Image (cartoon, rainbow, N blue to C red):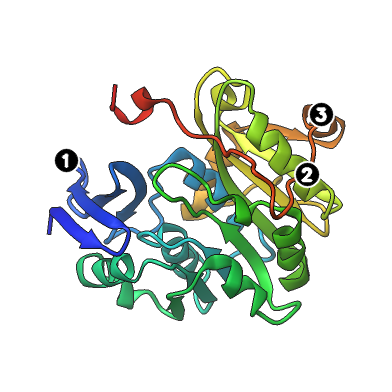
Amino acid sequence: MPGRYPISSGTAELLQDADRENGWVLNVGGVPQSYVDLSEPTYLDFGYMEIMGGVVDRLGPRRAAIDAVHVGGAACTLPRYVAATRPGSRQVVFEPDAGLVQMVREQLALDTVPRLDVRIVDGRAGVTALPGDSADLVVVDAYTAATMPIELATDEFTREVARVLRPGGVHLTNVSDGSRLAFVRRVVATVSGVFPHAMLLADPDVLSGRRFGNLIVAAAPAPLPVSGPVPGPLRAAAGALVRAGRLDGDDLARFHAGARPLHDGEETPTSTPPPQVFGQD
């Protein structure tokens, strides 16, 4: 099972976690894309994934089933988490790399995740084809190597997400950035122009620009469900959400002041990590 596998976009590699017998890291093009524990799907190893899990924990009543859409598949960490913590949830994943999906099916037991529909399609086309008011959660966590596709962050795409979300739904986007956080400022400006409520969540060092990392942009038609206790086995993700740095309200408005929303057709560079982030220096 550990080893390198050819996929449609190049090469994927599976690495076993030395500390967890059923823990696996999926690298694509040398970049870590997912961590899954096949025996404990509620274990979220990556910090940004814990933050997203903490938001999911607070979507409506605890353990109530939801309808979720995931743009970007990789090893399907968050869909596994939703299936385990909210039994009966219906989920669709849009992942254009057919070879990657097949490898995850064969090596990481993807077909054991209940009520999960994985479609080999570009995420933007997949979301556009969905009916309105059909999802409680839309997650964008899609990368080509270490770069987020710009077409998944524009105003035009965000309005499609808003069309698909129900009034109590939440849109989560995983953005990587560093230093001046110029790219994430534009992403926040974009979602803030579409949704009345938005928030930026990340490790405090990443949020301050002291180091490169992942930031979660959360947006919704209604106030975001990020406060309050979550009892039982969900405390790890809930704790990560509490510990995360947070910008909202006037602080978030100041953060993206002067940043222009992203639009289709722009030649806009996304943020890429410095080589040392993945040990390439």
Residue 29 x/y as whole percent: 29, 46
Q: Which residue: 58% across, 32% down?
A: 243
Disc 2 marks which amino acid? Answer: Pro
Residue bearing the label numbered 3: 251
Tell me the residue at 40%/62% (across/down). Answer: 76
Give the residue at mark 2: 261
Disc 1 is placed on an element classified as loop
The amino acid pointed to by label 1 is: Ala
Q: CA distance from mark 3 to mark 1?
A: 41 Å
Kind of element beneath mark 3: helix
Residue denoted by label 1 = 18
Cα gap from disc 2 to disc 1, whole angstroms: 43 Å
Mark 2 falls on what kind of element?
loop
Q: Quadrant of residue 277 in the image?
A: top left
Task: Give the side of residue 42 with respect to residue 167, left or right.
Answer: left
Q: Nearer the viewer, residue 178 or 79?
A: 178
Residue 139 versus residue 98 in the image, above or below: above
Label whose residue precedes the other's in the sequence (2 or 3): 3
Residue 80 pos. (x, y %): 41, 65
Q: Residues within 10 Å of mark 2 (few under 14, many from 20)?
A: some
Residue type pointed to by label 3:
Asp
- Residue 61 got which mark? none
Mark 3 or mark 1, which has the lower sequence index?
A: 1
Q: Residue at x 42, y 25 (%)?
A: 274
Asked if labels 1 and 3 touch by Cβ distance under 8 angstroms, the answer is no
Q: What residue do we see at 61% from left, 56% from top?
A: 152
Q: Please indicate whether residue 279 sits to the left or right of residue 84 in the image.
A: left
